[in-house]
Amino acid sequence: ATKIQQPLPAYPSGPISYQIIYNPPGPALTSMTIATLKISSPITINNVNGNEFSMIISKNGLYEFKYTAQSGLVCKMTAGVTWIDCQAPVITVDSCGANAFSSDKIISFYKYGGSCVNHALINDVPFESGKKVCEEGAYKIELTDTAGNLSTKDFIIDRTSPEIIGIEDKMTYKNDVSINFSDKLSGIQSAALNGATILPGSVVSENGNYTLVVTDFAGNTATRSFSIQKG
């Protein structure tokens, strides 16, 4: 006669009792929680034997504590989380991806994921979505939502042209000319002499007519035209 094997119980030599504790526990939204399994009899998880095991959870879903019972059978207990909001607030500066500008900008923000923005700072001063920023300078935006997610964005308003040092416009020089330039706010994006890229500190020595165009990251430009005539 064929012997029919009876199904094994779920936890043949498993814990007598257990509980899963969450910190923070919900239902208030949070960006992460720690699920801790506490049991009355030792089990083994990842080759560690004990009565308490924890995992960090940063996304909603079901998570398994897989363990080996004293009988050698691999079993599991499931933790379920529904109160995670891991989506940081979204910052827009006139819906533009750049971070340096030469004009006024509107700063906006919005939030997905269930929680809401509870702190919005620009250079450490509170502001509301839709704020218009006009003054030149460097700015840092920091947003925090009620779940603890943080967003930051840096941007610059720069209306000042780069500085070209030591070259006068429409000047004729009888010696070599050193090319130097700088920009205090947004920085130099490009510099071209007669259309060819040139680096600061370069020396022009050949006779001829030249035009230097320097552009910063906000789009401001400075131009100098000059010539060299050596005897």
Image (tube, grey):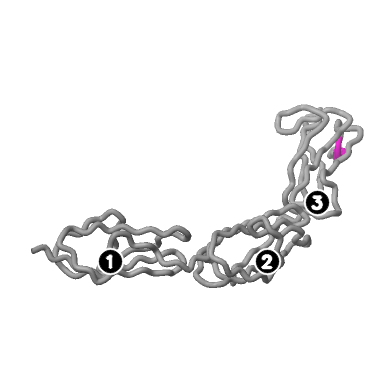
Q: Residue at x 82, y 43 (%)?
A: 23
- Amino acid type at circle 1 is Glu
Earlier sequence position, callout 2 versus callout 3: 3
Q: Residue furthest toward the right? A: 17
Q: Position of residue 88 (x, y in %)?
A: 68, 58
Q: Residue at x 61, y 68 (%)?
A: 133
Closer-to-camera residue (212/23):
212
Q: Secondary structure at mark 3?
A: strand
In magenta, the rendered stretch is: 7-11
| Image quadrant assignment for residue 145 | bottom right
Question: What's the mark number on residue 109?
Answer: 2
Earlier sequence position, callout 1 versus callout 2: 2
- In the picture, the quarter occupied by the N terminus is top right
- Residue ID for mark 3: 81
Q: Is residue 195 left or right of residue 97?
A: left
Q: Residue at x 81, y 39 (%)?
A: 36
